[in-house]
Amino acid sequence: MTRTQITGGLVITAAEEMHADVLIEDSRVVALAAPGTQTWTADRTIDATGKYVIPGGVDAHTHMEMPFGGTFASDDFESGTRAAAWGGTTTIIDFAVQSQGQSLRAGLDAWHAKADGKCAIDYGFHMIMSDVNESSLKEMDGLVSEGISSFKLFTAYPGVFYSDDGQILRAMQKAASNGGLIMMHAENGLAIDVLVEQALARGETDPRYHGEVRKALLEAEATHRVIKLAQVAGAPVYVVHVSAEEALGEIATARHKGLPVFGETCPQYLFLSTDNLAEPDFEGAKYVCSTPLRPKEHQAALWRGLRTNDLQVVSTDHCPFCFTGQKELGRGDFSKIPNGLPGVENRMDLLHQAVVDGHITRRRWIEIACATPARMFGLYGRKGTIAPGADADVVIYDPTAEQVMSAATHHMAVDYSAYEGKRVTGRVETVLSRGEVVVEQGEFKGRAGHGTYVARAATQYLG
């Protein structure tokens, strides 16, 4: 048995802040005690004096090695989970993809093959349903029993991932019966395709038009629609990557009526805007993602939604494509730019900067980045907190260190940073994954294959 003690730090969870020493045996936290009150024997002591001791981050929305538009996300499970660890995230939930005409099982098996033996940190899967039919609906029950307890559907991307209202309703009804949680990408894809066609016909081909055609009203309309479908089905619904004030308004209205409606936003919508999409010389292509970046005035609404708990989770939607050779596929036609941004390494630091800036409290930081994603997706108790019995996924965080975000220093397998040159206060110092040190004082100590697949329970966030 290996024993590790962490001494002298300020332990921060979603529930409380306390100066405490932490004792770890092998892969689990076994005790917390007031500083200096216990004389534990340990094989290793980590001095966290002046630092925060926080749970490892849970990023509930990543796309490693994701196929999109004739190419693949540039991070695979090895490079992407290593970068996550560098950024203080110790669990990711990625998306297995059902191909049209194929079974859910075939998609899940393909993603297990991509991830198995590659990951530096623990991982789970959601299931993207792109072909909702009697067969795939039947398969949902079996997947829930295997720990795939959430299913993502799209009102966007006709011909690729799009599901019509009837298919969405059927999936929601099935989830209502088996305890699954439906996640929705809510944009009106049919209307967006009309606006894309019209913009290109007018010669509007630059990256900034990606944001202009994917209108906030079309995000709000689809959000409203999926909430009503969930209400008819008697099912909870989780709306991914909320970017627009109007869409957030639909979620807030539903929640104020007591409906089980949940929302996620991402750092790019909190820190970036259409100003980035409008950068000259095709630089705006770096910021093409869907839902798109919005004008800056939407940011205040999203921060407010995080404070009022109308938004519960901040995930990254990490889906990186290199500028050279990948984003460039859309030169002369913004609709061909691969959709996605890198960010799995930046999330914990950006949200700590939000604490520094006064947008959220320290405990709320941990709540939206660690505890609630774990609860929302059936991992809490093991993940998202520091408590006896929890996995020893622990980050020693220096709240006073300063850093400048840059592609020159990040560890994601992508040739640009969405936050290039941004100065932030706070830095990850040491990261433990299930009791093993994976990052220590600026050095990676982890390994591919340390991370294990985690089967998830049903959502723990209801009631």
Image (cartoon, grey):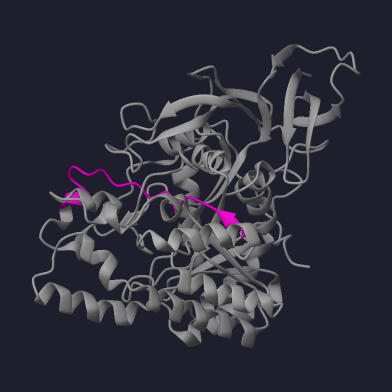
* Residue at horizontal 65 percent and vertical 64 percent from the top: 144
Q: Is residue 351 visible?
A: yes
200 to the left or right of 191: left
Which one is in front, 453 or 53? 53
Q: In which quadrant of the rendered view does residue 148 lie?
A: bottom right
Image vertical order of residue 403 relative to residue 387, above or below: above
Taking the magenta stretch, the answer to whether it contains residue 316 is: yes
Taking the magenta stretch, the answer to whether it contains residue 382 is: no
Which one is in front, 384 or 391? 384
Locate residue 278, reporting x and y percent. Answer: 22, 56
Quarter of the figure with the N terminus: top right
Q: Is residue 27 visible?
A: no
Q: In which quadrant of the rendered view does residue 172 lie?
A: bottom right
Locate residue 48, reporting x and y percent. Answer: 69, 19
Locate residue 404, reporting x and y percent. Answer: 39, 29
* Residue at horizontal 21 percent and vertical 51 percent from the top: 279
Image vertical order of residue 202 relative to residue 209, above or below: below
174 to the left or right of 4: left
Quarter of the figure with the C terminus: bottom right
Locate residue 431, reporting x and y percent. Answer: 60, 27
Which one is in front, 299 or 30? 299
Main secondary structure along the magenta-highlighted residues: loop
143 to the left or right of 243: right
342 to the left or right of 332: right
* Residue at horizontal 77 percent and vertical 46 percent from the top: 15
Image vertical order of residue 225 relative to residue 64, above or below: below
Q: Which residues are magenta?
A: 312-328
